[in-house]
Amino acid sequence: METVLSGIRSTGQLHLGNYFGALKNYVKMQHENRCFFFIADYHSLTTHPDPSKLHPNVKNVLAEYLAAGLDPEVATIYIQSDVPQVAELSLLLSMHAYVGELERTASFKEKIRKHPDNINAGLLCYPVLMAADILLHRATRVPVGKDQEQHLEMTRRFARRFNTLYGVEFFPESMPYNFGDELVKIPGLDGSGKMGKSEGNGVFLSDTDEAIRKKVMRAVTDAGPTEPDSPVSEPIANLFTIMRAVSTPDTLQFFKDKYASCEIRYGDLKKQLAEDIIKTVAPIRERINDIIADEAYLGRVVREGAEKARESANATVSEVRRIMGILPF
């Protein structure tokens, strides 16, 4: 059985792209592996979030993931800052992380380009903290996107360096968890690219029915096919991709046939798509609202998750301290 770790951003809302992408695979993965899921509130501090919003954001993200299917009885779900061992391991790993290699990371270069007035040490050491998150539970697999592949490679580098320096085979070299064809990519409503919060083209799991209808009806389309069996333009192909995820096969085929015969009415397509999205989102939204309102349940989830995570983390850090020569009297 693999030990799998996945970090969850402490800001933002879950949208259909998240749900049909990695999240549905997480729900399946948790029953097949020893899984740790954590909300990365320490990482968010590099961008100086509003302190009054940090805790509510963590609460909302936690509720959304629980509502979407992560099971605290099966997987370990915790808040990063509830496990102090991650900070200690990050410090210990930083003793063998070199400034030059940290400065060369693509994410650091991008951050200082975008935010030249906020070049803090946390940004520079972001890969070390990420490595500590992974190595804390000696994870063998990590689901990562393209933007995090370099950080995972650095984690493997730090693990190799530690093992070599101290003559041990303690840390595994964590590899990507590849969902392959199971990873569904949901495009946005703006006619191109993927669905995302920053792009403003997403349907969120917490959206009301009316908000969903308005968003879908504003989705980008084209002038329509001019002759039978015309190639499908990107905006319409995107709508068909979303429909494939939320609608019945018969519904999707009906509109594809209408497009092929030049009889399609985009207004009808959008109305049907909106209602099918609502059927998917509404039950999850109701669970989100119920979970957010249940303070006792959320408190129990984070306490029990932190306890399990700290037990695993303490075993790792205690052994790292011993290997490095930090011994009790």
Image (cartoon, grey):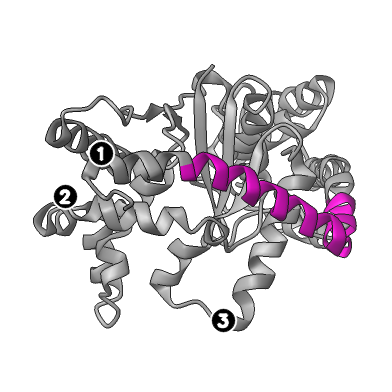
Does 64 sit above or below residue 121?
above
Q: Residue furthest left?
A: 100
Q: Is 311 in the magenta?
A: yes
Q: Name the disc covering residue 51, or none.
A: 3
Number of the front mark, 2 or 1: 1
State the CA–CA distance, disc 3 to disc 2: 32 Å
Q: Amino acid at mark 2?
A: His
Circle 1 SS class: helix
Disc nearer the start of the sequence (2/1): 2
At horizontal 46% and vertical 24% (from top left) the residue drawn is: 178
Q: Amino acid at mark 1?
A: Ile
The residue under label 2 is: 96
Quarter of the image for residue 297 reads: bottom right
Position of 67 with respect to 116 (left or right) is right
Q: Is residue 141 in view from this perspective? A: yes
Q: Residue furthest top?
A: 1
The residue under label 1 is: 323
229 and 64: which is toward the camera: 64
Circle 3 SS class: helix
Image quarter where the N terminus lies is top right
Find residue 121 and report its horizontal and vertical position in percent.
26, 71
